[in-house]
Image: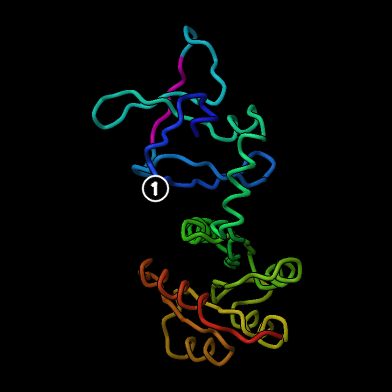
């Protein structure tokens, strides 16, 4: 970060934090910084016509104590800096095993709002996100990129969650994929249908995000057979 901002490097802190970001092209970068204090939503104000445009500075925001803080645009800084600054950090992290490919989670729901909110939550857990609006579209996604875990709705057009689960279980390449079904259908009949098809976890709405997180992490970490 110091190199990107052209400020003195703090060599007194041995326990630095690494922030993984993507630029406009989707390429990943590792940014080393002292530490992360907090994560919060802020209102960004433009710097105004009396201040010159500064590369990498999106604007400014007012913090809770009334102080003004600049808002940094990391993709802009990366775009306007030499790749020689960043590459050594990535090479060291890759050699140490600190950077690994993130697992993929497929979110299947015909509700756009439900799909987006669930995708955002699972993304925050460290997963790369794939989405589909029904079972048929999910099959197309799986054929191009096999997910590590799938979260599906019960009722969907063209192919519902139970039919999708049965299809996944019938395929040798995907039969061991963890599947969590999230639905408003709370009857024993619907749960029995899902379980018979091969659903691992059946959650009814409203559900606890903490419980969902525990299920996702546990199912992903469980050993699975390889085809």
Q: Is residue 46 magenta?
A: yes
Pointer 1 residue: 15
| Residue depicted at x 34% and y 42% | 37
In the rendered view, tell whether residue 120 sits above or below residue 70: below
Q: Is residue 16 left or right of residue 88?
A: left
Q: Is residue 186 magenta?
A: no
User: Where residue 184 appears, x then y in whole percent?
Assistant: 44, 74
User: Where residue 63 appears, x then y in whole percent?
Assistant: 30, 30
Which of the 4 image quadrants contains residue 137? bottom right
Q: Is residue 14 left or right of residue 227?
A: left
In the rendered view, tell whether residue 189 sits above or below residue 11: below
Which of the 4 image quadrants contains residue 226? bottom right
| Residue depicted at x 59% and y 82% | 162
| Residue depicted at x 63% and y 49% | 91
Choose between 57 and 46: the one closer to the eye. Answer: 57
In the rendered view, tell whether residue 141 sits above or below residue 41: below
User: Where residue 145 appears, x then y in whole percent?
Assistant: 71, 66
Choose between 49 and 195: the one closer to the eye. Answer: 49
User: Where residue 128 appears, x then y in whole percent?
Assistant: 59, 59
Q: How many numbered discs? A: 1
In the rendered view, tell whether residue 39 sits above or below residue 130: above
- How crowded pointer 1 is (Cα within 10 Å; few <14, some 14-19, many 20+) is rated as few
Main SS of the magenta part reads loop
Magenta stretch, residue numbers: 42-47
| Residue depicted at x 64% and y 41% | 87
**Residue found at the far top of this picture:** 50
Which of the 4 image quadrants contains residue 209? bottom left
Query: Colour scheme of this structure image?
Result: rainbow
Quadrant of the drawing holding the C terminus = bottom right
Name the element at disc 1.
Answer: loop
Q: Is residue 24 left or right of residue 43?
A: right
């Amino acid at each position: 970060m110091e190199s990107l901002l052209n400020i003195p490097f703090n060599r007194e802190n041995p326990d630095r934090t690494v922030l993984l970001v993507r630029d406009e092209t989707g390429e990943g970068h590792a940014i080393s910084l002292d530490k992360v204090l907090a994560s919060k939503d802020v209102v960004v104000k433009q710097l105004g016509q009396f201040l010159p445009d500064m590369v990498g500075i999106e604007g400014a925001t007012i913090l809770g104590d009334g102080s003004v803080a600049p808002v940094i645009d990391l993709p802009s800084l990366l775009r306007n800096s030499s790749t020689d600054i960043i590459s050594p950090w990535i090479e060291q992290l890759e050699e140490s095993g600190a950077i690994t490919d993130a697992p993929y989670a497929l979110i299947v729901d015909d509700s756009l709002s439900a799909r987006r909110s669930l995708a955002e939550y699972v993304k925050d857990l460290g997963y790369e996100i794939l989405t589909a609006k029904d079972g048929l579209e999910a099959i197309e996604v799986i054929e191009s990129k096999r997910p590590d875990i799938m979260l599906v709705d019960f009722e969907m057009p063209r192919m519902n969650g139970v039919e999708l689960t049965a299809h996944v279980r019938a395929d040798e390449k995907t039969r061991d994929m963890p599947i969590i079904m999230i639905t408003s259908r709370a009857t024993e009949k619907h749960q029995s249908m899902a379980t018979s098809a091969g659903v691992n976890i059946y959650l009814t709405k409203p559900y606890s995000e903490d419980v969902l997180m525990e299920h996702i992490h546990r199912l992903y970490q469980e050993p699975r057979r390889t085809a």
